[in-house]
Image: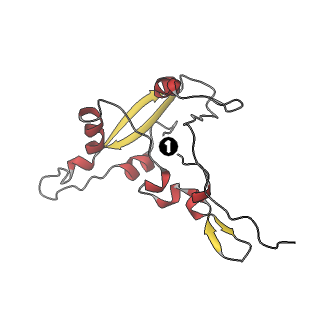
Amino acid sequence: MNDQAAPMTPTETDEPVVMVSGIPDMNRPLYRIFPLWFFEAALTTNAGNLFLIRPDAWEDPYEDICSKIMLQTPDHKQKMLSPYLRPAFAQCWSFEGQSDALLRAYSRVNRDAATGRNTEPKFEGVQVKTTRQSLFAPSTNFPRREGIPN
């Protein structure tokens, strides 16, 4: 009998799947704060389109929980879980429209002592309000899989 397990290999993605759950009201407001420079770029160079980004590319390493989970192989070595998962692309939105914590996390204001003006205005935050219905309307072109909620 062979003691060695089959080698672990990352899964391959065959098609994009949109998964959104836990938001029963399609018209409930969602909020996101963008740095001003990012928001301007989305409007001018991306034709107003927003892009989904892999969580491992996000600035805050704690938002990519899968990068912190380790697997133990049969030979007692550790490997990260994330390479074995299907690639995920996401954005963070909030139901909270008035959040000082989110404003501080996603914008920066450094006031000049003499003028009181922000020395780095491109890092000021811009709050965007939308709904699940508006945000995910473009994703209707993606294939759906049986049993996966929209």
Residue closest to the far bottom: 76
Please identify the quadrant where the C terminus is shown. top right
Picture coordinates of residue 29 (x, y %)?
A: 49, 28
Dot 1 surroundings within 10 Å: few (below 14), some, or many (20 or more)? Answer: few
Image quarter of the N terminus? bottom right
- Give whichever of 146, 56 is nearer the camera: 146
Which residue does the image show at 62% across and 52% down from the upper left?
11
Task: Name the residue beneath numbered marker 1.
Answer: 90
Residue 32 sits in which quadrant?
A: top left
Q: Is residue 103 left or right of residue 78?
A: left
Q: Which colour scheme is used?
A: secondary structure
Q: Which of 68 and 99 is in front in this view?
A: 68
Compared with 60, 23 (above or below) is above
Which residue occupies the foreground of this view, 139 or 68? 139
The secondary element bearing badge 1 is classed as: loop
In the visual, does 60 lie left or right of 14? left
Above or below, 149 against 101 in this view is above
Callout 1 amino acid: Ala
Provide residue 132's location: percent of width, then percent of height: 52, 27
In percent of the image, x 38 and y 33: which residue is there? 128
